[in-house]
Image (spheres, rainbow, N blue to C red):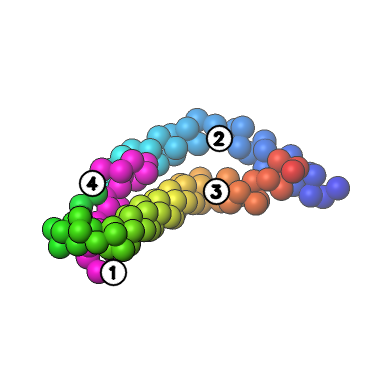
């Protein structure tokens, strides 16, 4: 019963602050537009640059790895895996950046539960 009352109060707080929440989300989007995430493979053969909104901007491959991949099927397979790994690492880093941006804004608004998916699900009674 108390959880329900707490949830209702939190939802009322969210509704009361909808303009501030919209402004905070606009700030998050603006900040993400300005961010770039760079991931380089450990062997420096691949570099990925992605925006804060997970758009792939640049994929750079070293000349050495391209030369090897052109003549060696094993090197080609390794390069393909390295490219996928670098892109996945960049996507994971983007997700961390987005989470941190949203958490910061939600905390500044005094509603940190907005940034926590589990807490938000509980808040919504799911």
Tell me if label 1 and label 3 are in contact, CB under 8 Å.
no
Mark 1: few/some/many CA within 10 Å (<14, 14-19, 20+): few
The quadrant holding residue 4 is: top right
Image quadrant assignment for residue 38: bottom left
* Distance between the alpha carbons at the discs numbered 2 and 4: 39 Å
CB of mark 2 within 8 Å of CB of mark 4? no
Q: Which mark is residue 58?
A: 4
- Measuring from the top left, give residue 23's x and y in whole percent: 43, 34
Is-magenta flag for residue 48? yes
- Measure the alpha-carbon separation of dots 3 and 2: 15 Å
Q: Secondary structure at mark 4?
A: strand
* Residue corresponding to mark 1: 42
Residue 34: x and y in percent read: 27, 43
Q: Nearer the viewer, residue 121 or 12?
A: 121
Q: In the rendered image, which quarter contains the C terminus?
A: top right
Residue 41 visible in the displayed image: yes
In the image, taking residue 110 as reference, residue 58 lies left or right, namely: left
The residue lying at 28 percent from left, 69 percent from top is 42
Q: Which residues are magenta?
A: 37-57
Q: CA distance from mark 1 to mark 3?
A: 32 Å
Residue 123 spot, x, y in % from top left: 70, 45
Residue 28 magenta-highlighted: no
Mark 4 or mark 3: which comes first in sequence?
4
Cα separation between marks 4 and 3: 30 Å
Residue at numbered disc 2: 17
Q: Secondary structure at mark 1?
A: loop
Closer-to-camera residue (93/111): 93
Tell me the number on the disc at residue 115. Answer: 3
Q: Are marks 3 and 2 in contact (CB under 8 Å)?
A: no
């Amino acid at each position: 019963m108390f959880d329900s009352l707490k949830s209702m109060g939190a939802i009322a707080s969210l509704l009361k602050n909808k303009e501030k929440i919209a402004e905070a989300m606009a700030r998050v989007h603006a900040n993400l537009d300005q961010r770039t995430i760079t991931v380089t493979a450990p062997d420096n053969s691949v570099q990925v640059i992605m925006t804060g909104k997970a758009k792939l901007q640049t994929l750079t491959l070293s000349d050495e790895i391209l030369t090897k991949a052109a003549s060696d099927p094993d090197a080609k397979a390794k390069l393909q895996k390295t490219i996928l790994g670098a892109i996945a690492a960049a996507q994971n880093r983007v997700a961390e950046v987005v989470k941190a941006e949203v958490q910061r804004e939600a905390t500044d608004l005094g509603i940190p539960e907005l940034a926590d998916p589990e807490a938000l699900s509980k808040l919504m009674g799911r």
